[in-house]
Amino acid sequence: MSKTSKTATLSFDDKTLELPMMSPSAGPDVIDIQKLYAQGGVFTFDPGYTSTASCESTITFIDGDKGELLYRGYPIEQLAEKSHFLEVCYLLLYGELPTAAQAEDFESRVTNHTMLHEQMQNFFRGFRRDAHPMAVMVGVVGAMSAFYHDSTDINDPWQREVAAIRMIAKMPTIAAWAFKYSLGQPFIYPRNDLDYASNFLRMCFAVPAEDYEVDPILARAMDRIFTLHADHEQNASTSTVRMASSSGANPFACIAAGIACLWGPAHGGANQACLEMLREIGTVDQIPEYIERAKDKDDPFRLMGFGHRVYKNFDPRAKVMKESADEVLDLMGIENNETLKVAKELERIALEDEYFIEKKLYPNVDFYSGIILDAMGFPTSMFTPLFAVSRTVGWITQWKEMISDPMLRIGRPRQLYTGPTRRDYIEVENRG
Ligand code: ACO
């Protein structure tokens, strides 16, 4: 970010402050308010950070009005079509697409870290079988700092690199084992001769009793889902990772915090909530009733998979997902899928409805992803863990960017306090 000659003038009471402005390489200019409190004695108020840039970043950019998502400058549609997840991981982590030699070296480094410390199996076995896989993932990923102490020193660039590779490599194993544990099936070890997505599908669906052949079309669809979810600017879970790491916490603890945040239905949990909603709607003729409920201010119901804090146009990832949904259902021989019909019709009706047009509510990435994952054989409880597998590279890239920034400061927002002012303690006999 470069400082510009522009300044913003802020006047209040008898003060006038000249605030410096900065220009990004894309997106709106930024007013630098870092000295606002020191110079003006006031805070700004921005719950939900709707107008606040919390950091400087070079990784991902969204143009919400155009419906554009760029990883290191490359449009998501091009990456989804031409690239693959591990290449995207390299791009995000190191800023450039790899040469053939760099790609080979990176893929072999990730592949050689896919196994989990054997002792971690005991950790898994401590959970109840009916635990949500996200609960297991928060616990197991947090526990990685107890198993991999040799990559927790955030001041050592080599340890940071090893932690990044370990996270990307082991997260599919953790998610697959959380799934296997919930099914009461044996854990399946990773196979390093398979690509990232195929290895993950095999760890989820193979059993020791028989061979499991990964369908390349399903592997491609899985890989694309990973790519589409790999990073997304300063979303809630990424900001959580950054906030946790600002105190100097180790990377495994920070990613566990990100997973906890991702679990919520307004964020990563939306794909599960969306499929459940589409199933609840059930048939096309029920759609108008649900559209009315979504518009009713007194009804807490929202159309899951619709709306986004940043996109005020189509989420570009939703378009790719819609195509993938058709491909996967076709491959699985699932014809006339009622849920897909409901989704397509719901999208059509909502996009013509004044309420949704006026509020610029469009389908987001979660609208079609649940249908694909369901067709692949994943239960809804695995949808958010899959999102966590994909987003790990984004979290770790943003974490690395933050830790290597010489300007790193602990994240410590201010508040607009509206509680009681100072008062003296009242003895219990005098209360009432
Ligand atoms: N259905 C109905 N109305 C909606 C919806 C929706 N899905 N989303 C937003 N609105 C309405 C709100 O009621 C509000 O109306 P108002 O101005 O009359 O009060 C207006 O649109 C703006 O909504 P906000 O909640 O203020 O928008 P915000 O940017 O804070 O929220 C969010 C974004 C959380 C994604 C929201 O659109 C939502 O809850 N969507 C459903 C959940 C979902 O799909 N989440 C996935 C996000 S993508 C991801 O995490 C990968």
Image (cartoon, grey):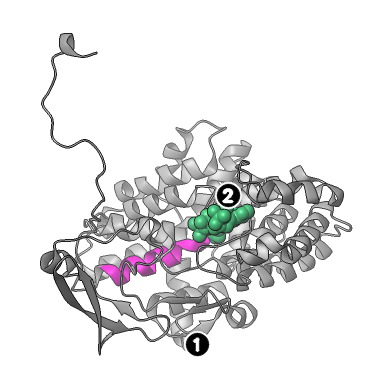
- Estimate the x, y position of residue 252 in percent, counting from the top left: 34, 54
Q: Give the residue pinned by disc 2.
A: 188
> Cβ of disc 2 within 8 Å of ligand 1?
no
Determine whether 267 is above or below 182 in the image. Answer: below
Which of the marked residues, 1 or 2, is nearer the chain's N terminus?
1
Magenta segment: 389-402
Determine whether 263 is above or below 35 in the image. Answer: above
What residue is drawn where x is 37% and y is 79%?
A: 58
How far apart are the two marked residues, 1 and 2, measured between alpha carbons? 30 Å
Q: Can residue 120 be found in the magenta stretch?
A: no
Look at the numbered disc 1 and give the secondary structure of its residue. Answer: helix
Question: In this view, which residue lies farthest toward the front?
Answer: 14
Q: Which three-letter amino acid code belongs to the residue tagged 2? A: Ile
Q: Can residue 397 be found in the magenta stretch?
A: yes
Q: Does the rendering let one see residue 203? A: no
What residue is drawn where x is 86% and y is 49%?
A: 285
Question: In this view, which residue lies farthest toward the bottom?
Answer: 5
Left/right placement of residue 144 relative to residue 82 reads left
Q: Does the rendering let one see residue 390? A: yes
Residue in the foreground of this view, choosing between 223 and 43: 43
**Quadrant position of the N terminus in the picture:** bottom left
Give the numbered dot on residue 100.
1
Residue in the foreground of this view, choosing between 212 and 102: 102
- Estimate the x, y position of residue 240 in percent, counting from the top left: 36, 56
Determine whether 422 is above or below 53 in the image. Answer: above
Q: Which three-letter amino acid code belongs to the residue tagged 1? A: Ala
Quarter of the rendering containing residue 332: bottom right
What residue is drawn where x is 19% and y is 65%?
A: 155
Residue in the foreground of this view, choosing between 169 and 223: 223
What residue is drawn where x is 34% and y is 59%?
A: 46
